[in-house]
Amino acid sequence: MDFLTFSSLSDDLFNNNLFDIEESSSSTDTFDLFTGSSINTQIVGTAESSITINTNDSYNKTIITGDGNDYISAGLGNDTITAGSGSDTFAFNSPFEGVDTITDFSIQQDDKLQISGAGFGIGKNDFNRFTYDPATGGFYFDTTQLATLPLNLSFEQTTNIIIV
Ligand SMILES: [Ca+2]
Ligand SMILES: [Ca+2]
């Protein structure tokens, strides 16, 4: 069974083994998606406005959002995320959510990697537990890879990571 929870009923949904989220308003919308399918799911938000996507399934997902300042909590699975322009936030709730690929993480656009201090068992200033390898794009918590980012970023832990 699939569950979809939308905070706004003005959104159009097309479900054909993909979720296509189209927004026509300038509002901020939240999408809580529980795909519950073994089929790889593509979630596409073509929004100019900011959207929040929370998923909590273990499957590998493709998530694409638009020009707004988006918040994406991809959850479990090895997910591929493209957040478009805007200042986007990518949430990591624990070290055990797979290795996500963030195709367009941008320092210039002030994108952020948001780390759950509780989920990682760390303090708010433990930035030195995280490393970015510009040669591979690998983003690590200690020795655990959390994500693959674009190569050769001018990454600064205290600027590009938020521990909440
Ligand atoms: Ca993930
Ligand atoms: Ca965006």
Image (cartoon, helix red, strand yellow):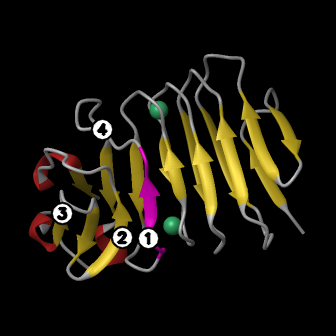
Tell me the CA gap for discs 3 and 2: 12 Å
Q: Earlier in the sequence, mark 3 or mark 2?
A: 3
Q: Position of residue 85 (x, y in %)?
A: 42, 28
The residue mark sitting in front, 4 or 3, is 3
Reading the image, the residue beneath label 4 is: 106
Tell me the CA gap for discs 4 and 3: 15 Å
> For residue 146, which numbered disc appears in the image?
2
SS at circle 4: loop
Amino acid residing under circle 4: Ser
Closest to the observer, 28 or 24: 24
Q: Earlier in the sequence, mark 2 or mark 4?
A: 4
Magenta segment includes 68: no
Q: Residues within 10 Å of mark 3 (few under 14, many from 20)?
A: some
Tell me the CA gap for discs 1 and 4: 18 Å
The residue mark sitting in front, 3 or 2, is 3
Tell me the CA gap for discs 1 and 3: 14 Å
Q: Residues within 10 Å of mark 2 (few under 14, many from 20)?
A: many
Residues in magenta, as a range: 97-103
Q: Position of residue 10 (x, y in %)?
A: 80, 26
| Residue at figure coordinates x 23%, y 30% from the top left | 108
Reading the image, the residue beneath label 1 is: 99
